[in-house]
Image: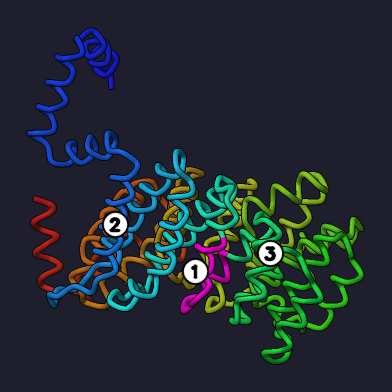
Amino acid sequence: MATQPKLEQRLRDLSHEELIDVILAVADTNTSARKVIVSMTSTIKEQVSAVKKDLKKLTQRPTSHRRVMPRDVANALSSIVAQIDRISHHAPSMAFPLLCAVIVAEEDVHSYVHDSYGTISDVYYGDVIPLMVLMTQRTSDPTVLLDGLRSVCSRDAFGTVARLMQTIADVLPEQVVTTLLDEVQDNHVRKAIYRGIGDILNYIHTVELSGELRANDHFEIADMYLDHDDLKGAQQYLDKVSLLDRESSLRGREVYERYVMHTKYPAQIEGFMHARILSSPSPEQVDAYRAQFGDEALSTVIDELVQKTAQTSASDIHSASPFLCLVREGRSADAAAIIETGTISPFGYYRPWGELVQALASHGHHRAASLIVRLFLEFAIAPAKSAYYDEAIRLYRLLDELAEFVTDWGTHEEHDAYMALFVERHERKWSFWERFAAIRG
């Protein structure tokens, strides 16, 4: 903001007493500012007390029957984690037990919140676990670490503890790891600790205590062998998994890609990267292939992608990725030609397809872009639900904008004819047309 430097200078020019008066005045008139000021000026003991109070409130089941929104709980949880982070810079030994309490509280939180989209879990995975890694390194007292982790490892209803222990095991003091392995009874958590410290034999032994090795266990064991630069060991366990199981698993694909890159055999690496572009092209994969094998080799792969996409049946093309890849690599005409044959069946969110619409239009392929928008317009209005009508109206208008640049519709229905049929097909959706008229003004 342009006024900020001036305001900063004015505040610096104030006397000590005048600055205090300004801060108190802001605190009296703005509740949010008051909370920030109180938080920034409180003692460590007061901050710890505030976190405990907030955490207790978070874990208590609401007495009212009003639905608790996951986003509200996630925001409250993020705020608590941020407070603990501030405390850890000055008193890590006091902050560490608080963060452990946050992890222990996960089961209580999930008991009254339906987190179907993983909003709360995202905070645990994205905020809590990374902070736990930092705090494990900041906390020098093994007793504090051990006491906190004992409480954490006591239960793991959602797999967060296992993920945490796998992440921090290699940065914990050896005596802490040894004691936890002696005391923890949950084989799932013990397995995660062995995975974290890279102990392959004990990992396998712990898994076998609970049953046979599964595909994901083979992937983790292969990954551990790769950590030790043991390609033979990694291959031994990857070979025990079927191609279908490997390709249908994200973890399997990750480990196999790492294995291939470790082999350092150009032909094998090229074949792997080549196949990845044909199956699920992304800018990262294309750029990596170009950097490794050059533009000429990539051009051949893109030719194959054009041919493969054109030959794929309409019911099997649900993703915009192949088309976005073609446009990005200067093959927008090929992308437009495939779309105009009707060999697409969009699925999922509009966003990636919307990016493709913009990309095609920017390269002069407004007709192909219009055909995509027509499909999504029909999807938006077909359920006859008012929640989708604003999106349908936006797409309706977008068709009008794109049509201005199309002079030849080829074998496709011209814009005016399509719009007339659209109105006829959906003329009984009164609420849609009322909203359309209101927005149009």
x and y percentages locating residue 52 in the rendered image: 31, 57
Q: Amino acid at mark 3?
A: Gly
Q: Is residue 307 left or right of residue 375?
A: right
Total number of numbered discs in the rendering: 3
**Helix, strand or loop at mark 2:** helix
The x, y position of residue 126, in whole percent, is: 48, 56
- Within the image, what quadrant is residue 377 found in? bottom left
- Residue 221 in the image, given as x and y percentages of width and height: 77, 73
Q: Position of residue 194 (x, y in %)?
A: 71, 70
- Seen in the picture, residue 120 relative to 336 is either above or below; the reply is below
Does 321 appear above or below 249? above
Q: Nearer the viewer, residue 218 or 21?
A: 21
- Number of the front mark, 1 or 3: 1
148 inside magenta stretch: yes
**Residue nearer the viewer, 438 or 12:** 12
- Give the residue number, with chain letter if any, for mark 2: 76
Residues under labels 1 and 3: Cα distance?
Answer: 16 Å
Q: Which residue in the protein does label 1 denote? A: 152
In primary-sequence order, the first of circles 2 and 1 is 2
